[in-house]
Image: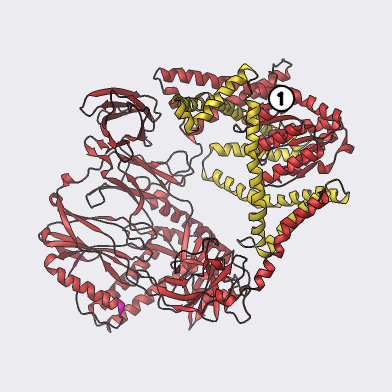
Chain colours: A red, B yellow
Amino acid sequence: MKLNYAKTGSILFLMVFGFLLAPIPSHAAIDTSSYIVENLKADDIPDDDGSGLVLSWKPLPKEKRIIEYRIYRGVSPDSLFYHGKVDVNVKTGVAGDVMYYYDSGYNRFVDIQSPRKLKKEKQQSDNSPLFGRLPRDLEVTGPQLTNYRLLGVIMEKDFLYKNTKIEITEDDETEVYAGLKLRHFIYILKKLRADKEYYYTVIAVTESRKYMPHAEPAIGIPIDNSPEKIQQLYSVYVEDQTRLQFEWIRSLFTDDQSNHSLYLVKKIDLNKFNAYVEEQQKAEMDPEFETTLENPAQLIYQRYCGYPYTPDNTVAVDIIDGKIINDKHNIDVEVGNIEDYVAVFSLQDRAGYETFSDPSLFDIVNSVDLPKISNEWTVEDRKSDKGNYNSIYWEKPTVFLTNCTYLNDEKTKILVNYDIYKNVKYDKVKNVYFTIFDKSGNKITTINEFYQDSKLKITLKEPSNRISFEMRVVVNGDSGEDQLFTQDLIFNPDVKSLQPGVLFLNGEEVNKYTYSVYKNNYSNEEWRLSKNTLGAQRGIVDNVSYRSIIYKGVSKFDAKKGLFMVSPTFNVRMDDELKNNVGTNLYAEEVAKSIENYEKEIAEYIASKDTLETEAEIANADDAIEYYQAQIDLTENDPILQKAATFKNNKARIKFLEKVKNIARRSFKYKMVKTDGEAHFAISEVYTTDNVAKLPFDESARETYPTLGKDHFYPIPNWFQADKLPALIATFIFGFMVLFMIRQAKSGKELYIRPIAGIDEIDNAIGRATEMGKPILFVPGLSGITDVATLAGLSILGRVAKKAAEYDTKILVPVRDYIVLPIAQEVVKEAHYEAGRPDSHDKNSVFFITTAQFAFVAGVNGVMIREKTATNFYMGMFWAEALIMTETGNTTGAIQIAGTDAVTQIPFFITTCDYTLIGEELYAASAYLAREPLQLGTLKASDYTKFVILAFVVIGTLLSTAHATFLINAFPEK
Amino acid sequence: MKRQIPLIIIITLGFMFVAHSFIPHKISTDFFDWYQDWVKAVSPFAVSLGIMSLFMVHGTKIKRKISNWQYSVITLAGLVFTAFAGFMWGTQSGTPYMWLFENVQMPMSATMFALLAFYIASAAYKAFRARSAEATVLLIAAIIVMLGQVPLGAMISKWIPESSTWILNVPNLAAKRAIMIGVGLGMTATSLKILLGIERTYLGGGD
């Protein structure tokens, strides 16, 4: 059969769309009952807070071509909503006999991306209980609030300013809520409720997206369990300081933790303690079980740990005069001989379940056996940032070997790589001195790395399996004499090479210890982890985010107004003793009512005390009375709330509170812990300074926060990025030169511009197309309009199009970027108008092909071949497609001129095009073609600036060779 | 006015973004983020311009029965059907849209990319013909670099891989960096010309 265009087109059409016919017969033959998932079960997840179930089912064989399993959940078997899916590789299927899906923790409830209305699931029968995702429609979603524990994640600004006051009266009690639209929540997350029944089903979806029938729903009941046991507790007794030190490995599941507690157990009481723990476990399994035993362990430390941060895992408890005393937790424990005790750590969850660690024996040491933490550490605002980082740095830079490779077969030449950990104070290293010894201790050589390229080339007399290094770092203002690093290169037979050994600093193993930096602000009582670092590191930056998020439980809704309701109360900071949160209400008028409520609560507790029987109940009532009294005192007397109460306008009041709250949230104090991970640690003092930095807001804030700037550090936003100063100076010099050269050119001074063959040939190339009566092809690169190369390409297009219009030659401009398209169209149109040939302008001469890289090339190649273009221009940014285009142009016999700043594509253009504008020539072309003073001035200025750069390069090279690195150091490192 | 308003916008925003690169302050970064959000919101509307252009160009070809107009039918049918498939059945795995992507577009793109290997061979042949002293140097350098990349080079002589590395790391890198410096300056000069309103060709109509 002889192919013509019509036949070829028809075959291609059938090839592309013929697949539509293929699935129809295959669908008809499917027996859907064999696609129903079997063995579906929903089991409780252990060690959690009663919010987790694990689903399991038998996956279908891979011959069934399943692409995903979709999971549906509900609180009754007749309404199950889409919850999630598990993707499956169609080709390989599922390897095991059982598939699992964990429904645990907080997951998506409803958000702005949820569907507007509830929809039945696709391809299911009319009586199917399956529905799509829960919709935004509150009539449907609202009633589901009671079935889950819901958490609203809200941007602080939305909570403070976009709320609607809602009053709900039930049983003569009026409660006030803040109503928020769904769009004001970042997310509304849900968790399963403990001890509640949930129904699940699963459907299989085939490769052709056929939704199969669902499995019989399975019931699951999540149960609240005691927390996960920690892996290890380490206990140390520092004899000369009579101090107990504890460190533990944090557990993985941290969502449901309320308290960390440490106990001392007498060794003679261990059996009693184990019996107590066993009894507690039985009580957890069986709520009817009555406990009889008392905990023989003595509580010596307790703290709240329910914040969404990583808490400190090191604790030091001092024994003073044989006693451990802590008023806050009513601890008063007499401690005898420490060898008679073991320590136990416990994690308590919000439901009161407690998990104890294995008992840990004390390692008795003296303070000299503990690591030493240097006093030489600093906290300061990080320079040149937007005000979201504090810098914490300590000691002097560390140098260490990282790798070694042989450079010859004789193994007598080696390349050793090294690295340096610097910090903010010592950011420029002048010299690093390496003294190298063989295994007998004989000196091989000394190397002074005045320019640190992280490489040392060393020649050995003979191959060696151990080489020793002594290293010293000289930094600005310090000779490094007091810091001698030693490290060996030791032959490793496994990799058949020398490998770096342990690094020592003045004889102490550097990486035996790690540094942990902890921080604490005015809003929380407890310290939280900022960062852990290796012992060799010398600084960290601590992120202090601007983004402030409020977490609120969501319990009610108003379907008519489309509002979810949350509590209108919020915390501003903690009181000065870090005992109570200073809280208030979004609505000023509710503050007074809250005092009335507190008083009412106190009266009720006082009245109830007469009827209480046990000491524990009375103690609880006393605690509650104390708490409510504290709240009344704070509301009435706290200076922040007092000042807030003076605002008549509630918006101004909230604005003031927001500002104060932000200062509390973003001001941190810091401490450091140097530890071996096994409770041998040293804790620094909280960092304080007398150099109080200027605040980026009203200095009166110091009245509220007197320690601000002294021990609490608020990151300051900067108006200039100091490390870009050389770039700014260079920009000004360049700008000045441009203006100067423009003035020169305007004054009539002849500016010599070196000839560029590619540009000179542009006119000839256009002339050639005119003579041949064939079109010109102009490709303005594949990049977007934000690329300067594209702008340069479009400028050249303007000149070429004008010339082409003058000669009445057709110009074709295929475009890949749809934002470039209208600009290119406008450029060509205006060029025709300027040339006085609007009649010759064809609006379809600039056309979009596709954004797909290789499809675009195919399109351009097609244009070249079909239109038989005489001249091809490629001006702009190109990638791998460049060669395919230019080789095709070459075979069609077109004259080709290319210009690009893509270094990797320049060789291809040089090889296949007649003329190539290399790098900057692309940018010069427009000016070159225009031959105007303004344009030539910039061109000349570029040339002079290049000369200045070249001078810097030459001078820098010469100075560096002479060990003078000040010029290199004057420029910022990247 | 048609030219002045865009110029004022370009110059004002241009200088603001130059300033932004030296100002790390929150006000500056917030403004930049806000601008980027708007770019993300506005740019999808430009897709319609591309689609209109495709319809105009290919519609004209079909209407006028210009030679090879059948390909235009396929192009437009492909465009319409792919969009229809995406809107109708979604873009997940297993849908007609994804089928088209995986079984039509991907193999075709791969085919085009595969052609590159042959074009490189052809271009290498052209480039490495020893027609002049410079071309001979290029040829020798190319042979060394190519041999240095394969085990055969090391088998011939241990100096070949080392020479290959040296060629790549010293003269090649030096030339690349020289080009990059020129490109950097060229970009700055072009940006400056645009900011100062000296270069206006991209707005249409030369100066």
Res A445 visible? yes
Does residue A651 show up magenta in the picture? no
Q: At which x and y percent is residue A767? A: 82, 26
Secondary structure at badge 1 equals helix
Q: Which residue is mark 1?
A: A758
Figure quadrant of residue A936? top right
Q: Is A438 positioned to the left or the right of A170 in the image?
A: left
Q: Nearer the viewer, residue A398 or A350?
A: A398
User: Can residue B1 be seen from the camera position used here?
Assistant: no
Q: On screen, A323 above or below A414?
A: below
Please, which chain is the residue tagged with disc 1 on? Answer: A
Q: Is residue A743 above or below residue A90?
A: above
Residue A177 location, x and y as percent? 51, 71
A515 to A915, vertically: above or below: below
Q: Quadrant of residue A445?
A: top left
- Residue at 72%, 15% (x, y): give it: A750
| Magenta-colored span | A285-304
Image coordinates of residue B145 in percent, x first then y, are 52, 28
In this picture, residue B138 sits left or right of residue A553: right
Majority secondary structure of magenta residues: loop
In-front residue for pair A265/A77: A77
Q: Amino acid at mark 1?
A: Gly
Q: Residue furthest front?
A: A1
How crowded pointer 1 is (Cα within 10 Å; few <14, some 14-19, many 20+) is rated as many
The image shows residue A234 at horizontal and vertical percentages of: 22, 56
